[in-house]
Amino acid sequence: MTDQTITSVSREHRKFRPSAEFKAQANLGSDAAYKRLYAESVNSPEKFWGRQAKEFLSWRKPFKRVLDWKLPHAKWFGGGQLNVAENCLDRHLGTARENKAALIFEGEPGDVRTLTYKQLHREVCRFAAALARLGLVKGDRVAIYMPMVPEAVVAMLACARLGAVHTVIFGGFSSESIKDRVNDCKAKLIITADGGWRRGKIVELKANVDRAVVNTPSVEHVIVLRRTGQLVEMTEGRDRWWHEFVAGVPAEHAAKAFDSEHPLFILYTSGSTGKPKGVLHTTAGYLLGVTMTTKHVFDLKETDVYFCTADIGWVTGHSYVVYGPLANGATVFMYEGAPNHPEPDRFWEMIDRHGVTIFYTAPTAIRAFMRWGDDYVKRHSLKSLRLLGSVGEPINPEAWMWYHNLIGKKRCPIVDTWWQTETGAIMVSPLPGITPTKPGSCTRPYFGVVPVILDEKGVAVPKGSGGRLFLAKPWPSMLRTLWGDDDRFKKQYWTELEGYYFAGDGARFDEDGYLWVVGRIDDVLNVSGHRIGTAEVESALVSHPAVAEAATVGRPDALKGHALVCFVTLKNGSLASPELKEALRAHVAKEIGALARPDDVRFAAGLPKTRSGKIMRRILKEIAGGGDVKGDITTLEDFSVVAALQSEE
Ligand code: 7RM
């Protein structure tokens, strides 16, 4: 390849300034303040982070050092001790937050439950005490495989309180995935439920655990929450009902303090090949990162009702449903089920009923809302909303504008937050009230974050050109290693360029220094010497009125390097036809340029996605190339989608 930069094809130039009203009340209210703090955070990081750590966290024992950095291993806040559960709960007791709602829960069947900080604290203490009686000690690993119910949060916080290391496994994963993850970290205990509700049906959590534990020698006990009431098999001696397990246990538990670098959780994330990676996060740095970003990026106020739609099985659920919001004493709204049950307006209906003020979701969800139609939104007022967020993928300008107009009613700032399981907390995002936004750009770095875009030789690319995204400085919430595989940790993140963290994404800076992430670098295509991010082709396709969602992959082509193959799902009411195919090819050529004219457009009923909604382009690449689907597909949400695509060839 001669041209190593990614061709910049976006034509998005719209800019949205924060309203004077929003700005006047924002937690961080001036660009000058952001610039001053940002400069300090990168020029004197130890001074900056040391001060923030004292301000945002409650310490049992003050830290002595801010950072020990032996590349690629960071130790933050050495000598310090604290307890994460205490930071999320105990420190709010005896304050005005004590009787404030910590969790407002709504189950899919419509059952609503509120737990105040005091009540949540009691449940966590009781469960932690019961786990301690069972013999669970600091450092033991615990797998949590639960529906989105308050007890999932209780389980996470009880582990944190005891210094046990949790690994949350998304409730949609199969028994095979449970087995692999449990065996990798040798979990002693699995916490699950008899089932959870999803689209009116029961997800068979306990049955999946039963199949997995046949091959997980480390597991001694399984604790089972009664959620659905359906009959499940209980194995004598191994399995315990949650309600029986805690019955009679006093809601008292004296939390111990743990070192700043004590492991907090392992979260498995799929690699493009091979077995999932166990990303390890530790105590103080992680908690500081999520606590600060929750406050600043979501402009969190005491009166907010905050709704992040992510499942706790995803890092977004860890950082922005549980740890970040609770450490700030926020009211978190939590929903168990599907967004289209019983009707596609479930979220909007709940937002009105519970008075949700902050709403954080993923582009894949936004595109689904668009596909379901505006009428479902227009039935509801959404007047309580004041801030919107997006995470998980590049948000195409089309979806951004829809979100802005239909959900935000042009009134709510949108924070497009770029970060990863590995970064623990938000790295790049607008600060609402300060940063003018551009549809599709995650804009500017958060404090302490230094994103750089480099070509294959490690040379910075000029503004406007694309390249590979790196982070140039360590940050408190960074992953510490991959569980049991430090070599893979070094190889995956730290060897592309000595001293820099390799994010694996392709990106560019525009003329204002705004960051545009165009997707995973493996998804960047080389078409006749031009490197094109798949996200930009997809964004062009989705700007056509007939298209709901699109995924673009490359098929090896002797002439061009890569031929562009586009998979497209259509909006309700649009019909697939050869004419539409031609129209879409022409549309992309018009939007981006002839070089990006798709070689092939294929209509599909659905696209293969991970549980967290990311399109699995690797699978589409294999389908486009006419080969078998190989490699790890344990994160695939629905295999029937793949089968349908293959049968259409
Ligand atoms: C939080 C999360 C990480 C990958 C990341 C990107 C993509 C996430 C954005 C985004 C563009 C965004 N963790 N990504 N957020 N791309 N703009 N705002 O998603 O580990 O599951 O995924 O997701 O490719 O590297 S994750």
Image (cartoon, rainbow, N blue to C red):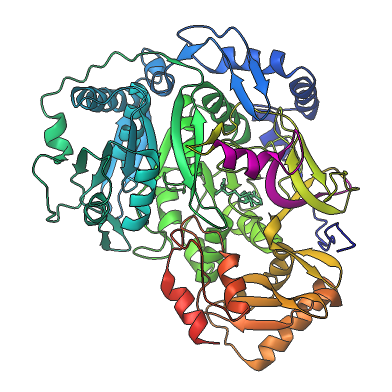
Residue drawn at the location 72% of the way across and 76% of the way down: 556
Question: Per the image, is 525 magenta?
Answer: no
User: Viewer-proximal residue, 419 or 501?
Assistant: 501
| Horizontal side of residue 618 vs 123, given as left or right | right
**Quadrant for the C terminus in the image:** bottom right
Is residue 628 in view? yes
User: Viewer-proximal residue, 275 or 296?
Assistant: 275
| Horizontal side of residue 250 vs 566, given as left or right | left
Position above or below: 640 against 427: below
Question: Per the image, is 505 magenta?
Answer: yes
Residue 519 percent location from the top left of the image:
68, 56
Position above or below: 502 against 101: below
Residue 448 percent location from the top left of the image:
71, 27
Extreme residue in the left direction? 236
User: Viewer-proximal residue, 492 or 260?
Assistant: 492
| Horizontal side of residue 99 vs 239, given as left or right | right
Please count the marks in the image: 0
Residue 34 percent location from the top left of the image:
75, 27
Position above or below: 625 against 77: below
**Rendering quarter of residue 299:** top right
User: Viewer-proximal residue, 220 or 255?
Assistant: 220
Residue drawn at the location 81% of the way across and 64% of the way down: 531
Residue 421 percent location from the top left of the image:
55, 42
Is residue 417 in view? no
**Rendering quarter of residue 246:** top left
Extreme residue in the front direction? 487
| Horizontal side of residue 416 vs 340, given as left or right | right
Residue stretch rendered in magenta on the structure: 486-511
